[in-house]
Image (cartoon, grey):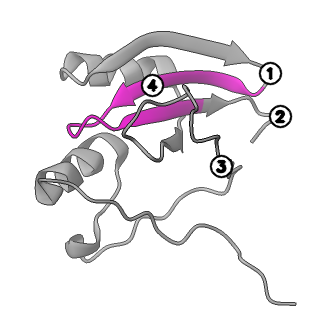
Amino acid sequence: MAKVTGIGGLFFRSKDHVALGKWYEKYFGIKTVGSGEVWKTEAGTTVFAPFKADTKYFSEPQQFMVNFRVEGLDEFLETLKADGVKIDEHREEMSMGKFAWVYDPDGNKIELWEPTPESN
């Protein structure tokens, strides 16, 4: 039976897509299409969760939020903070792992997740 095997891409608009692409490459190691390379991820859990239209989990007018799995969340946040990246001071830790949130230069909220070994 035919089936979907994973997420093949993420596409979104930006007023300065070149600068934003460079920002994602610098901090997240993601190569953009124009670089001639593709970004390969490690195997792990991917959550697909449509939210109610009035969710407070991320603010309007943002219609989506990307969640990145990370290793060494606290160290990663220190690196971002040292470079002046906007960081939400709220943190959460639960059975699935540790969570933090940052904002890209366009103001998009990004969720960072350090999964526990059991949840990955």
Label 1 with label 2: CB-CB less than 8 Å: yes
Secondary element at tag 2: loop
The answer to whether 97 appears left or right of 103 in the picture is: right
Looking at the image, residue 28 lies above or below residue 95: below
The Cα–Cα distance between marks 4 and 2, rounded to whole angstroms, is 22 Å
Q: Which mark is residue 50?
A: 3
User: Which is closer to the viewer, label 4 or label 2?
Assistant: 4
Point out which mark residue 118 bears: 2
Q: Position of residue 2 (x, y in %)?
A: 80, 89
As drawn, 40 above or below 68: below
- Estimate the spatial distance between the alpha carbons at disc 3 and disc 2, rounded to whole Å: 24 Å
Q: Residue at x 74, y 42 (%)?
A: 120
Q: In the orientation shown, which residue stands out farthest toward the top? A: 89
- Judge depth for marks 1 and 4 and give the one in front: 4
* Tag of residue 95: 1
Inspect the image, locate mark 1, and give the three-letter code of the amino acid beneath it: Ser
Tell me which amino acid carries mark 2.
Glu
Residue 10, percent from left and from top: 44, 63
The residue sitting at the bottom extreme is: 1
Q: Secondary structure at mark 1?
A: loop
Q: Residue at x 19, y 50 (%)?
A: 20
What's the amino acid at mark 3? Pro
Disc 3 is placed on an element classified as: loop
Name the element at disc 4.
strand
Which of pointers 1 and 4 lies earlier in the amino acid sequence? 1
What residue is drawn where x is 51% and y is 32%?
112
Q: Which residue is mark 4?
A: 101
Asked if the magenta segment contains residue 102, the reply would be yes
Residue in view at x 37 percent, y 27 percent? 102
